[in-house]
Structures are given as structure tokens and as C-alpha cells.
Image (tube, helix red, strand yellow):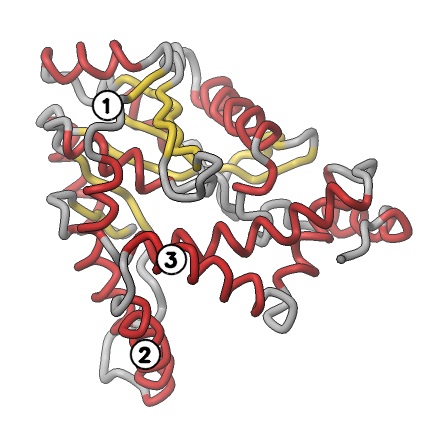
Amino acid sequence: MTDGAVRRGERLEYAAVMAVLTLLRLLPYRLRVRLAGRVMRWLSGPLGLRRRIRDNLALVRPGLERFEATEIERAVPDTIGRVFAEVFSPEGMMQQVRGTPITGDGAEDLAQAQRAGRPVIVVSGHIGNYDAFRTALILAGHRVGALYRPFNNRLFNRRYRAAMEANGGMLFARGRKGMAAMVRHLRGGGVLAILIDQHMDQGAPLTFFGKPAMTATSAADLALKYDALLVPVYGIRRPDGIGFDLIAEVPVPHSDPLTMTQALNDSLERRVGAHMGQWIWTHRRWKGRRGRRARKAGGDRRPESG
């Protein structure tokens, strides 16, 4: 994200997003979320989202039956639309998550760390709604900050920050200033939320769904440096499309960054495998020549859209 005057293109993009948000906010929360999902399903073809989903499925799940692939193609854009509406409806998200228990074998570890003032790093991916768990932690009294990459559109970035911080959380932008604030937060016994399922050019060549996937080891690096609990967490969407199951898995044991980060990838892979339509398959997770060759080789097995 560069400094300087806001460009005309940025203003036009922002105006379009704000028009959509304004219309959605005229609706009750549940209807707003459902409609956003439906609209994104309509737009998924023209936007090229279905093609990206098919490409990724051809790479890592070439044996899927056509009907299974078609269901995923329909479900993923719906998930994207719902998350968009939920992120920009922080009051609705808080109301929805309030009273939902954090379950899983790592739930008590989180509570003990909070009582002891120990730093915690919770790690998730773009599955279900990753913000649901962050919101639940805030409601439970944790001091939660999230590491994120600022959007190129500065007007949209300001709106996004305001929405994400409306419930009392904090955002740390990647960069020197954001990293310094993040370190202070961790040292003070705070919770840091990180997503690890996007391609990182400077990451480690680990695996995800059996294929090479460049993955940032920063969560493990920080956990080791500041003796932080490292916990895989998930906000999995329930069948009603509105509520969530909030799951904290057993903390990843401290060892070395590569082993710990691969354990995080494996945890996310299991969750995605169980909820294929809830992960954002539109990301270019498997970049590089190996990924391109594998996609090309699997081209004649690519599932067709419905």
C-alpha cells in the first residue's frame, strides 16, 4: 500500500463496495448474510471464481466426482459472500457468537493461558469464518490482536480496520511499525491471531494436501521466541449458514519452526477435508512451476461446473 493522494480508481472501487454494503445493511442481519452469499454465487462465474476453484481441485483432489466438485463450486462463493457481510456487520457477529462456547481439546489451555497471563498465538485459515473465533475470544475477555496485510485500496482498508476493531480487537499491519506493536502485545500476555493458508514467496516449502505450498513460519517463530501457546482454532459454519462451532485444538508442541508449521498445515487440511465448501479455494495457494505442471497434467480430469 503506497502513500500519497488517493487515486480515482481507488475511489470508484470504494464507492462500489460502499454501495453494496449500504444496501445490505438495510436488511436484518440473517437475511443480509444469506443474500450476500446468494449474490456472490451469482457473480462467481463472471468473476472467474469457479475456474480458480476447479483448477485447485484438479491439482489436489483430481478424483472428485463431478457432483462433489459442483457442490464445492457453489458453496465456496456462498461462503465468501457470507464472510464479507459478517465482517462488515461487527455488531451482528458479536450478537451471533455471544453465548457460543469454545469447544475442543485446546479450550482449557486457552483459559489457563489467560489466567496465567501467558502469550497465545491462535492460528487458522480462510475456512468458515475465521473472524468468529476472534470475536468469541474478545467476548471471553482476551486481549486479541490480529496480524494482517493492508489492502491496496486505502479507503477500503480504513473501512476494514474500523469494522475489525469495532468489537474491541486490534489489527497489526505487516511492516516495521505493526510488527513492533505486535511484539509489545505478545510480551504483555495478549492473544495474536494469524492466518497461514496463503502463498508466501519467502515462506518455507512445506506441504498442504500433499502438494508443495510455500508457508510462512512466523507463527511458530513467534511462539518459540516469546514462549507463546500455539493453538489451531476454527470457526466452522453450522448447517443453518449463520451460527458457528468454535473449536480450539490441542496446542502444537514447541520444537522447531518447520515441524510446528507443518503441524498447523496438517490441522487445517483435516478441517478443510471435512468441510470442503467452507474453505476459500479461490486462493492461489499452490504457486510455482510444480503447481502449474500438476494443474496442466490434471487438466483432462478437471471437474466440470454445473
Q: Residue furthest bottom?
A: 8
**What type is the residue that disc 2 sits on?**
Ala
Tag 1 or tag 3, which sits nearer the N-term?
Answer: 3
Locate the N terminus by quadrant: bottom left
Residue drawn 26% across and 66% down? 25
Disc 1, SS: strand
Q: Which dot marks residue 120?
A: 1
Marks 3,1: beta carbons within 8 A: no
Residue type at tag 1:
Val
Question: Where residue 65 sits: x, y (%)?
Answer: 82, 39
In front of the other: 216 or 40: 40
For mark 3, what is the residue? 84
Residue at the location (25% across, 52% down)?
173
Q: Which residue is mark 2?
A: 19
- In the structure shown, which secondary structural element does the residue marked by tag 3 occupy? helix
Of callouts 1 and 2, the N-terminal one: 2
